[in-house]
Image (cartoon, helix red, strand yellow):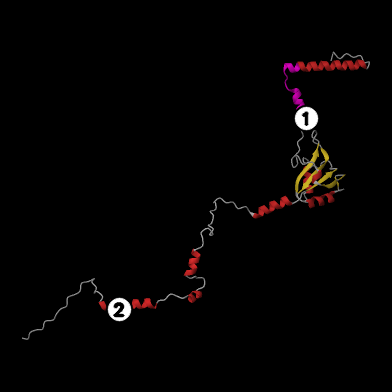
Amino acid sequence: MGVKSKQRIAPKKAAGTRRAPSKKIVAAKEIVEEKAEEEFELPSSSEDEDFGGFSDSADDEEIAEIPAETISEPQPSSAHTVIKPKQKLQKSQEKTKTKRGIIYVGRIPHGFYEEEMKKYFQQFGEITRLRLSRNKKTGKSKHYGFIEFALYEVAKIAAETMNNYLIFGHILKCSLVPKENLHEDIFNGANTKFKVVPWAKIARRKNDAPKTLEKWTELEKTSELNKQKKQQQLKSKGIDYDLSSL
C-alpha cells in the first residue's frame, strides 16, 4: 500500500479580526495626500473680482477697524407703546381750523322754540349751539335767539336765505354776526331745556311754613307800624277812617 500524502490544513481565521494594512498601502496614501496639498492653491485677486459681493482679507480688516461708537445700537422700545391713528388726528385738526359762524334770528313767532328751530335750521348744516332768549321769571320767549353753525359759509347761506322769510305769520330777521361783537356768555344755557322757576310756589311755601313765637311778634310789630303810617296818610288827605279795628 502506498503512503497517502498528508495535506496541510490552514487554520481558520477568527471572526471579527481584520488583517493590518501593509506598509506599501500606507506609503501610497501619504504620497497621494502630499500631491493634493501641492496642487491646491488659493484664488488670486482677479478671481475675487469674479465673486461679486465678497471681499478679500484686506477689506475684512478695514471693516474690523470701524470704531464701535459709530455703530448705532437699536434702542429698546417699551412694550406699552400706543399708536394714535392719523385719520382721527387729521379730523380733529381740521375741526379746530374751521371757522364757525353765528347768526341772529329775530321776530321768532310763538310756538317756534328751541326744538323746532333746531329741526328747521339743520337743513342748512350742522348746528353746534342754539339759544333762544327767554324771560327768567316767566320762562316765555323774548322772540329772538342765536344759532352757531359748524361752518362759517353755512351760517352765511342760512342768514341770507332765511332773512325776511315768512313763518307762522311773522317775517324773520336773520343776519350774520361777527363773534367779536358778541358777549362771551351769549350761549350760556345753550342746547339745554329751559326750566321755569316757580317763584309764586316758592313764596307760598315760605309764607305757609310754621313760624316761631319771636317771628310772630316781629310780624305783629311791623303790621302795627304799617297801619299807623296808613292812618296818617288818610288824615293828611282829609279822610277820617279808623284802621285800628282791622
Quadrant holding the C terminus: top right
**Nearer to us in this view, 182 or 126:** 182
Whole-percent x and y of residue 87? 66, 55
What span is colored magenta in the figure? 201-216
Residue that appears at 76% across and 28% down: 201
- Amino acid under disc 1: Trp
- Is residue 210 shown in magenta? yes
> Is 189 in front, or is 28?
28
Of badges 1 and 2, nearer the viewer stands: 2
Q: Quadrant of residue 191?
A: top right
Q: Nearer the viewer, residue 204 or 135?
A: 135
* Most frequent secondary structure within the magenta stretch: helix
Q: Amino acid under label 2?
A: Ala
Question: What secondary structure is found at the residue carrying circle 1?
Answer: helix
Tell me the residue at 50%/68% (across/down).
Answer: 59
**How far across and down, in percent of the image, does residue 200 sit?**
78, 28
Is 42 colored magenta in this rendering?
no
| Residue 105 appears left or right of 53 | right
Residue underneath mark 2: 28
Assign the N terminus to one quadrant of the image: bottom left
* Residue 212 relative to residue 8: left or right: right
Give the image location of residue 225, x and y in percent: 83, 16
User: Crowdedness of circle 2 by 10 Å Cα count: few (<14), some, many (20+)?
Assistant: few
Tell me if residue 17 comes above or below residue 110 in the rendering: below
Name the residue tied to disc 1: 199
Q: For mark 2, give the secondary structure.
A: helix
Residue depicted at x 48% and y 69%: 58
